Amino acid sequence: GFLLSDGDGVDGFIKEAVAYGAEKVYVSESPVLKDYRTDPYACGAINLIRKYKPEIVLIGATTQGRDFAGTVATSIETGLTADCTGLDIDPESKQLRQTRPAFGGNIMATILDYPQYRPQMATVRPKVFPMPRRDDGRKGEVIKEPLPMTEEQVRTKIVDFLKGAEGVNLVDAEIIVSGGRGVGNPDGFKVVRELAAVLKAAVGASRATVDAGWIPYEHQVGQTGRTVRPKIYIACGISGAIQHQAGMKTSDIIVAINKDPEAPIFKIATYGIVGDLFTVVPMLTEEFKKRL
Ligand code: FAD
């Protein structure tokens, strides 16, 4: 693993990386890296990549990761497959097989890099892969590299941080209750929210409801929304379009409530309830209230 940090509390991150499976951790520490900025972070990574020549570089497809990965790949003059939903190693060529939606999500494309361009770089959305087992007894090697950039060389300065909109933390939620077009109108989300409240769950939504302005975008699950992997995903009045599934099909347990027994969501559901969500969801809420 590559680790770029201002050095403050970096030991914790090294231990964390090793506990989750890193055999070697390459660390660049500098006060210049205190807050994320494109220039110094890219500089640190480019320096490590040029020196240690990894075959594959994987980066989280977070807001910062997307910015960072593009800068690094361009400087190194290699390819970048953004927003992968699956990764694999080709058994014969040992090449990285990078899978991601293409053509508006209508097909899944598997991409291989030209052998003359290295490293093979991809960004992967959080939660696409299960968390490896943590083992605090593991030992790893730490290799330190100075950051070849000074504060004077950084083109951006951080002046202030302003608080944004209240976050909807879908990605870390253990339970998500999502509403689709079946809720009918913005008020229809009431039954979804009530069930979510009882289960201490986050509220998700399909794109149809976000596009209709029934609920803000932060709630959207799917290819153009969040990718989630909760323990339980309850889909209420969601048909289960491929683009919605792309963001939730790896949930441990999927419960689907839909009045159409032919809805595609039932093909991936662990439990399916065919019925009107305005009857079924309040019944679930009542029952969970009694039991929890
Ligand atoms: P519908 O498909 O209209 O389904 C509504 C369902 O509710 C139906 O199955 C119906 O039987 C059921 N229903 C109706 N009334 C009731 C009731 N009273 N009780 C129970 N069930 C009821 N979609 C996403 O969700 N996330 C994305 O990120 C996303 N990205 C996309 C990206 C691209 C490029 C494209 C082209 C599409 C994308 N979509 C995405 C849209 C996706 O294709 C679907 O249009 C969308 O997911 C449909 O939302 P829905 O299931 O809420 O609505």
Image (spheres, rainbow, N blue to C red):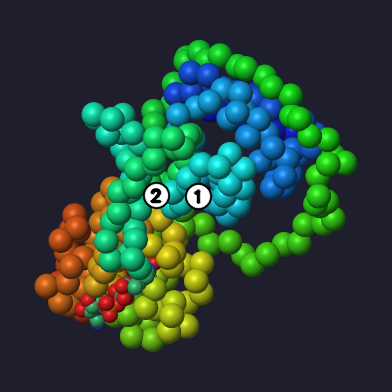
The residue under the point 34% across, 47% down is 111
Tell me if residue 143 comes above or below residue 253 in the rendering. Answer: above
Q: Secondary structure at mark 1?
A: loop
| Residue 35 visible, this angle | yes
Q: Secondary structure at mark 2?
A: strand
Q: Which quadrant of the picture is home to ligand 1? A: bottom left
Tell me if residue 256 comes above or below residue 15 in the rendering. Answer: below
Kind of residue indicated by mark 1: Ala
Measured as percent of width and height from the top left, residue 33 is found at 74, 38
Alpha-carbon neighbours of circle 2 within 10 Å: few (<14), some, or many (≥20)? many
Measured as percent of width and height from the top left, residue 105 is found at 32, 64
In the picture as drawn, the residue positioned furthest to the left comes out as: 261
- Tell whether label 2 touches label 1 (CB within 8 Å): yes
Report which residue position mark 2 lands on.
Answer: 84
Tell me if residue 52 comes above or below residue 78 in the rendering. Answer: above
Q: Which mark is residue 265?
A: none
The residue under the point 72% across, 45% down is 39
Measured as percent of width and height from the top left, residue 188 is found at 37, 82
Is ligand 1 less than 8 Å from the beta carbon at label 2?
A: no
Q: Going from the N terminus, do you reach mark 1 or mark 2 first?
A: 1
Q: CA distance from mark 1 to mark 2?
A: 8 Å
Kind of residue indicated by mark 2: Cys
| Residue 136 visible, this angle | no
Q: Residue 106 appears in which quarter of the rendering? A: bottom left
72 vs 142, nearest the viewer: 72
Q: Residue 210 appears in which quarter of the rendering? A: bottom left
Measured as percent of width and height from the top left, residue 76 is found at 58, 39
Report which residue position mark 1 lands on.
Answer: 61
